[in-house]
Image: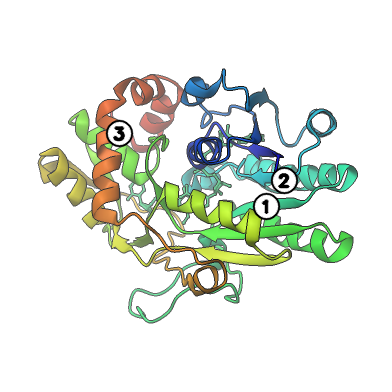
Amino acid sequence: MYMTIIVTGGAGFIGSNFVFYMLKKYSNYRIVCMDKLTYAGNLSTLESIMDNKNFRFVKADICDRSAVYKLFEEEKPDIVVNFAAESHVDRSIDNPQIFLQTNIIGTATLMDACRKHGIKRYHQVSTDEVYGDLPLERPDLFFTEKTPLHTSSPYSSSKAGADLLVLSYYRTYGLPVTVSRCSNNYGPYHFPEKLIPLTIVNALNDKPLPVYGKGLNVRDWLYVEDHCKAIDLIIHKGKVGEIYNIGGHNEMRNIDIVKIICKELNKPESLITYVTDRKGHDMRYAIDPTKIHSELGWFPETKFEQGIKKTIKWYLDNHQWWENIISGEYKSYYEKKFNIK
Ligand code: NAD
Ligand code: DAU
């Protein structure tokens, strides 16, 4: 069956991986990427598909009602998958306002367009951070879809606000929505302000590797392609009005991740630099993926040992991509924040 899918935030990390995945898997789908190209959006990422007849890129802000309505009028999408967001916790601590604007108002604007034009599915890409954190001394506890929302940062609060709004559009207007809450992703095209790509890029440049606090915080890492596969399943087979947690039981401490990267790149651990902890820093995230596994048959395919090797190789093979980024706006942000050159 022919489908048109609007993918917002498709010039960012997960959105671009999703666009590539969908174009490869469905030769009869039209994929329309709508992205504002903030500091985190990178059009060079999409260069290889710009001429693909099944692909269209539109630079627009999801908060811009007239631009959003115009695109819906032109494309008459069957499905909308919303990746567009301000995504970095540290930036939300420095400046919450833009997070509320994009993550909440932008989501509402997209859903209003969906109501106006009719849609088969609106999918909201959310995060495990909406559940807050778990204590390190209780490894038996996991986030399920029923875990109460208990956010820590302006970022996670804005994502939780958006989730509630999405579910309210289902109950109030009958909009056919689904929500997914995924754990930490890693893989190609990950912006080098986040732990894994920042560590790879800094290690390659023999620069300090900043570790917040004692490095004992735990994240549940998932290879980005496994996240894309889960979303593909949810938009085609998931039940409307439902939330699906996505995660692969791969909990790791930050310090261990940084040490693995040093080892893989043959760089000394003396590059590790302990820096001031993040305010309100969540201790541990851990997803229980039972629902998506039993209802939709999803399971993660890439083991961390393979995924991290593939990711490091990608950064080694794609110097130009990240060098262009670190020579730009990101660099001054990074220097200002940590006073590390
Ligand atoms: P990212 O920061 O790499 O990309 C975000 C993209 O959205 C960029 O291309 C940016 O230009 C675009 N964008 C930002 N504001 C916009 C606006 N107002 N209008 C249109 N486009 C806009 O983010 P990511 O890591 O790829 O995350 C994508 C989504 O997945 C986010 O919603 C995030 O909350 C969620 N998520 C991320 C992770 C993770 O580990 N990275 C895990 C779970 C969920
Ligand atoms: O859990 C899903 C979330 O994962 C997504 O919703 C967010 O969009 C995404 O950014 C990510 O959030 P985190 O805060 O977990 O990711 P980040 O890479 O910023 O940090 C991972 C851990 O590493 C966290 O405990 C903070 C720590 N850290 C981070 C950076 C950038 C460091 O110790 N040093 C660093 O330089």
Category of crowding for the residue at label 2, using alpha-carbon neighbours closer than 10 angstroms: few (below 14), some (14–19), many (at least 20) = many
Real-space CA distance between mark 1 and mark 3, rounded to the nearest whole angstrom? 29 Å
Category of crowding for the residue at label 3, using alpha-carbon neighbours closer than 10 angstroms: few (below 14), some (14–19), many (at least 20) = some
- Residue type indicated by callout 3: Trp
Closer to the camera, 260 or 291? Answer: 291
Which of pointers 3 and 2 indicates the residue nearer the eye? 2
Q: Residue at x 75, y 63 (%)?
A: 167
What's the coloring here? rainbow
- Residue type indicated by callout 2: Ile
Q: Earlier in the sequence, mark 1 or mark 3?
A: 1
Rendered location of residue 81, percent (x, y) = 65, 45
Rendered location of residue 64, percent (x, y) = 78, 32
Real-space CA distance between mark 3 and mark 2, rounded to the nearest whole angstrom? 31 Å
Asked if the residue under mark 2 is in contact with the one under mark 1, i.e. CB atoms within 8 Å, the reply is: yes
Look at mark 1 in the image and give the residue it sits on.
Answer: 123
Residue 79's label in the rendered image is: 2
* Callout 3 secondary element: helix
Q: Quadrant of the N terminus?
A: top right
